[in-house]
Image (cartoon, grey):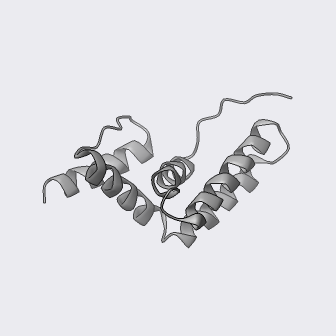
Amino acid sequence: MTNKSEKPSPEAKALSLYLMAFKSTSPKHKEKSKRVNRLWGLVQKDELELSDYLIEVQNIIKSFGGYETVVEQTVKYYIDKSGEWKLQGEDKYSVDAKAVADKLLNK
């Protein structure tokens, strides 16, 4: 059993943060969170191809309205909860989320 330390795709990161934010408010979100975590565990153990995992991530993101919607709702949730957006980084998700946060905070 090998433990890979691959960086998640922007979509996987977006979905993970989205599901963390909303899993306590909806059984659907909680179920999807468990599924994504289980699938990622299979990828880590070489029991599922990363490409198959990413296809499932894309399908789940589509079911929640798409990447942009997931990013926007996640950022809005955390801004409403804490009054600010704290996530920093150079990866695509962090840049996209920062742009959404800047837009929401400057309204």
Q: At which x and y percent is residue 44?
A: 75, 37
Question: Image quarter for residue 5?
Answer: top right
Q: Is residue 107 left or right of residue 47?
A: left
Q: What residue is at 37 percent from the left and 61 percent from the top?
A: 73
Q: At which x and y percent is residue 70?
A: 44, 61
Q: Is residue 8 left or right of residue 96?
A: right
Q: Is residue 43 left or right of residue 37?
A: right
Count of numbered circles in the view: 0
Q: At which x and y percent is residue 96?
A: 36, 51
Question: Image quarter for residue 46?
Answer: top right
Residue placed most toward the observer, 88 or 23 = 23
Q: What residue is at 30 percent from the left and 50 percent from the top?
A: 81
Identify the image quadrant of the C terminus.
bottom left
Q: Is residue 76 above or below residue 10?
A: below
Q: Residue furthest left?
A: 107
Q: What residue is at 75 percent from the left and 55 percent from the top?
A: 52
Q: At which x and y percent is residue 50?
A: 73, 47
Q: What residue is at 39 percent from the left and 43 percent from the top?
A: 94
